[in-house]
Amino acid sequence: MKKLTAIFLSLMMVFSLAACTSESPSTPSATPDSSPSESPQASEPASTPSSSAAVESEPQPETDAETGKTLVVYFSATGNTEAAANYIAEITGGDLFELEPADPYTNEDLNWRDEDSRVVYEHDNPDARDVELVADTVENWDEYDTVFIGYPIWWGIAAWPVDTFVEANDFTGKTVIPFCTSSSSGLGASGQLLAELAGTGDWQEGHRFSSRVSEEDVRSWLTGLGL
């Protein structure tokens, strides 16, 4: 009996040891940082931005915006209108363009008291007022948004060499501001007549300066225009 009991206990111990050796200890579960990602790209180096994305992120080069460039066009017989034009250009930062007759006026030509002078003949014969200019168009004309046009007053109207320039150019989209110089006459209808001759552009009322125009006179006028 004791032998049977001993054999039984031995068999029990053998079965017990076999059961223990068939189970392996559980391995620790992987932590979130060490577990493989579901995304296949996770194991690849971080991708660089695509070429299109790179272009979008790069700062774009600055372009020249419309700056509202100003042009001061003038015809001056004795220098008074030229002085006013220079003041306007200096104050506004505008460019200057002088209207020069291909056949320049001499002092004798400009003597309106002489019935045989050139200006008297041209006044009496409107067909003779078609004065050819050295240049009647401006380089980069389309860049100018504001155009001042200056002239002396001849017999109550703009000196006719200006007509040639006005007829030769398209003022569409431009603000045009006439100005004149005279010893006594006012601006009169000179600006309106030029506007009618042009047929395009936003022509403003304009201004008359005395023959002794000063920088202060011009600055005061421009301030009133908001320029």
Image (cartoon, rainbow, N blue to C red):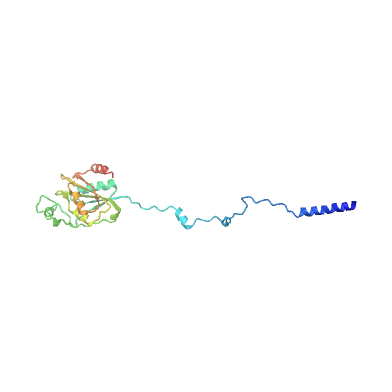
**x 83%, y 54%: residue:** 11
Location of residue 22 (image quadrant):
bottom right
In this orientation, which residue lies closer to the viewer: 193 or 227? 193
**As drawn, is 173 to the left or to the right of 183?**
right
Where residue 155 appears, x then y in whole percent? 14, 49
Where residue 15 appears, x then y in whole percent? 80, 54
In this orientation, which residue lies closer to the viewer: 36 or 149? 36
Task: Name the quadrant of the C terminus.
Answer: top left
**x 20%, y 52%: residue:** 196
**As drawn, is 2 to the left or to the right of 48?**
right
Where residue 159 appears, x then y in whole percent? 17, 51
> Of all residues shown, which one is farthest toward the left?
115
Q: How many marks?
A: 0
In this orientation, which residue lies closer to the viewer: 197 or 73? 197
**x 85%, y 53%: residue:** 8
Where residue 199 appears, x then y in whole percent? 22, 54
